[in-house]
Amino acid sequence: MASGHGLKEADLLQHLSFTFAVEGISRACSHQLVRHRLASFSQKSQRYVEVRRLGEHVVVPKTVEERAEKTFGEFIEALGGFYDRMMESGVPTEDARFILPNATETSLLVTMDGRALYHFFGLRCCNRAQWEIRAVADGMLSAVRALEPDLFRGAGPYCFQLGYCPEGRFTCGRMKEVAEKYRPPNEGEAL
Amino acid sequence: MRLELVTHTTDIEAMIATAVLTTTSKSKPSSLFRRLKKDPERVANILGRIEVQHGSVLDHNRLCWRMEATDTEVLEVLLRHRFFSFTRLDGSDWLLSSNLRTAIRYVQENEGDPFSEALIGSIPRSLMAILDEIGGKVR
């Protein structure tokens, strides 16, 4: 349809909708995700779903695992115990959750149109994005490229989309490496 | 004004039910969706007892129409609900899309207007059932 009407594919991206199930991310990560306003979310509620056995439902960053695993684990265990005791003493789920940490796991559905996705990838596949949401963004990009390789060939961090890095003095300085990472398969190296 | 539904995302009802249970159950959305897709009876049951007063569970889909309309008619629609997306294909030939929540809200708030009537006429009967079922509760 695009070629017949002299439209660019980008004009039609807004009419395409993609829904992802994002699972096992931290609430720290989901807080960043839901800041993308041109999107729709249905997220596991901590008002309705209790978080029992907290220790089994937390995301532990690698740096914490390397440098503070024991203290982190003890703290989570103490928090989990406190949460359970509050629940047993009749504190409502919606109030007991006030002590749950950012590390707590969550799941959600997120729906974005194609244009919003390009913007999301532009920001969140960037090397400057936080590692967890970057991993989510990379996963979403692989998924849409598998479905619509032509439409999402040019999607990736903004330096990949634009041909220059818009991060100014914060640039990671590794544009060539990034371009290589996001180059779709079966495409020659960029000149 | 002429409106024709060109396409829409599949499994809309199962996705709405998945969104409902994602917020309130321990199960993961991917496994909920896999199970619900094969269980239309359970989906109908969930849709029938939706109590939420906000329509965000109706957001996870998209319907796409071809529309013949003047610029003024398009402007009227956009002024009434800015969540419709329009692309001009040619002159008075438009492609537009929205999710079910936007379409339902439009119909609720603009009873009797020509676009509202055209929307109702264009939406398949199965999806209209969702409107009948929960439309009155959507905010």
Image (spheres, coloured by chain):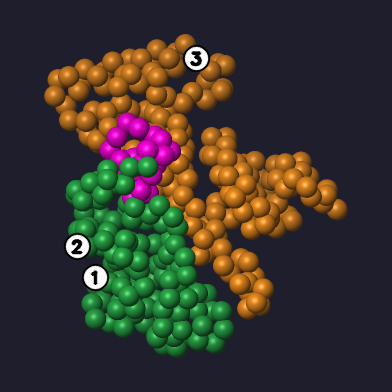
**Residue at point 44% right, 85% down?**
B69
Mark 2, Cα crowd under 10 Å, few <14 / some 14-19 / many 20+, is few
Q: Amino acid at mark 1?
A: Gln
Q: How far across and down, in percent of the image, does residue B102 sit? A: 34, 65
Mark 3, Cα crowd under 10 Å, few <14 / some 14-19 / many 20+, is some
Residue corresponding to mark 2 = B136
Identify by letter the chain in orange.
A
**Residue at point 63% right, 49% down?**
A145
**Residue at point 44% right, 55% down?**
B10
Viewed as shown, does residue A55 lie left or right of A175?
left
Q: Nearer the viewer, residue B33 or B103?
A: B33
Residue corresponding to mark 3 = A69
Q: Chain of mark 1?
A: B
**Residue at point 27% right, 45% down?**
B41
Rendered hue of chain B is green
Q: Main secondary structure of the magenta part?
A: helix
Q: How far across and down, in percent of the image, does residue A8 sit? A: 64, 70
What is the span of residues highlighted in magenta in the rendered image?
Answer: B14-37
Q: How far across and down, in percent of the image, does residue A32 sit? A: 46, 43
Labels 3 and 2 positioned on one and the same chain: no
Residue corresponding to mark 1 = B108
Q: Amino acid at mark 3?
A: Glu
Taking A154 as reference, is A28 above or below it?
above
The mark lying in front, picked from 3 and 1, is: 1
